[in-house]
Image: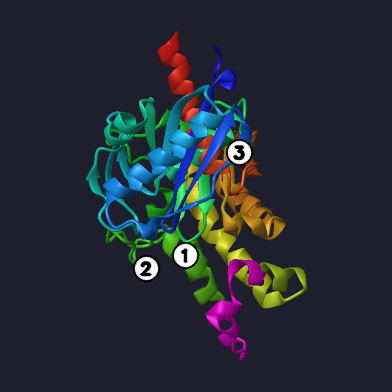
Amino acid sequence: MTSQAVTAVGVDFGGTSIKLGVCRGETLLETDAPIITGDYKEPDALIRAMAERVEKLCVKYPDIAAIGVGVPGLVDFDKGFVHVLTNVPGWHHIPLRKILGDLTGLPITVENDANAMAYAEWRYGAAKGMKNVVALTLGTGVGGGLILNGQMYRGGHFSAGEIGQMSIHFEGTSGHYGNLGALEKYVGNNQIAEHAVHRYAQAGVHREASECTPKAIAEAAHAGDDIARQVWGEVADWLGTALASIAWLLNPDAFVIGGGVAQAGPLLFEPLEAKMKSMLSTVVWEGLKLVPAKFSNESGIIGNAALAADMSATLSR
């Protein structure tokens, strides 16, 4: 049996809601109504709600063979253990694989959400067929995942790929862990808005942060706003500095960039390409691709389902 034939449930666990979907290969067969995270005050109750949804999906799709769960936090992939979740109270040291597996009777994978996005893009998306891939999501923060030599690389303690915590300035803004110059403190949604407000103020123009979301700044730039274009150029400089360093370290075949900030398209990708090219040798730059992610909001469901399907196919051999 190949993984393309395996039907699996992908679970995309977010800070406000949990999305479930049934996938067969890259085909998303069905999505279920979101589970509202805040409606459940303790992890056990929320896990039971997930199990009940899976049970109903299994009635409709009796060939479901596994469940893949992606979470926004630190996990132990081998043990299926969640150390801590971002912005979800009470989720500390939870043996999610064991609890959900006992409730459903199905094999479970537990993965970091950015790794799941990377897996989706490598398995079925923009980086399909490539051997060495760096994927990143640009949103409220910056998440990343690494595919090296055709395998997911998680590091010694499963926390590799945290591109948002890389420093681009040793005396810069402090990150969540005290790391000065953390990338996500420059190119996160809120940080881009704050920077745009500052740039407009320098030009004598008052803007509220709510008027300077990445989407709004992209629309302004497309309309010919020079300040908005300047903001995107600076975002590309910051991001390019980090990605050029990664390129020197890993020499990947491609960077796959997703998330809301990446929706700026050429406003981001064109100056980003120019910045990186200026910082890399021909040997490193030649053949390196900068590509937008194929999957959007469904990447978590597809990536987690693919991880679970591939695990199930391996176990059945």
Q: Secondary structure at mark 3?
A: strand
Q: Which residue is mark 1?
A: 186
> Of 250 and 279, which appears nearest the observer?
250
Q: Give the numbered dot on residue 231.
A: none
Task: Point out the image quarter for the N terminus.
Answer: top right
Residue 199 placement: quadrant: bottom right
CB of mark 2 within 8 Å of CB of mark 1?
Answer: yes
Q: CA distance from mark 2 to mark 3?
A: 43 Å
The numbered mark, 2 or 3, whose residue comes first in the sequence reads 3
* Mark whose residue sits in front, 3 or 1: 3
Image position of 127 with respect to 197: above or below: above
Q: Position of residue 186 (x, y in %)?
A: 47, 65
Residue 300 appears in the rendering: yes
Q: Position of residue 70 (x, y in %)?
A: 42, 41
> Which amino acid is tagged 1?
Tyr
Residue at left offset 27%, top offset 53%: 42
Q: Label 3: few (<14), some or many (≥20) within 10 Å?
A: few
* Mark whose residue sits in front, 2 or 3: 3
Residue at left offset 34%, top offset 43%: 48
The numbered mark, 3 or 1, whose residue comes first in the sequence reads 3
Q: CA distance from mark 2 to mark 1?
A: 8 Å
Image position of 116 with respect to 15: above or below: above
> Which amino acid is tagged 2?
Thr
Q: Give the numbered dot on residue 173.
A: 2
Q: Which residue is mark 3?
A: 30
**Which segment is the magenta one?**
197-217
Image position of 204 with respect to 24: above or below: below
Residue 149 appears in the rendering: no
Q: Label 1: few (<14), some or many (≥20) within 10 Å?
A: many
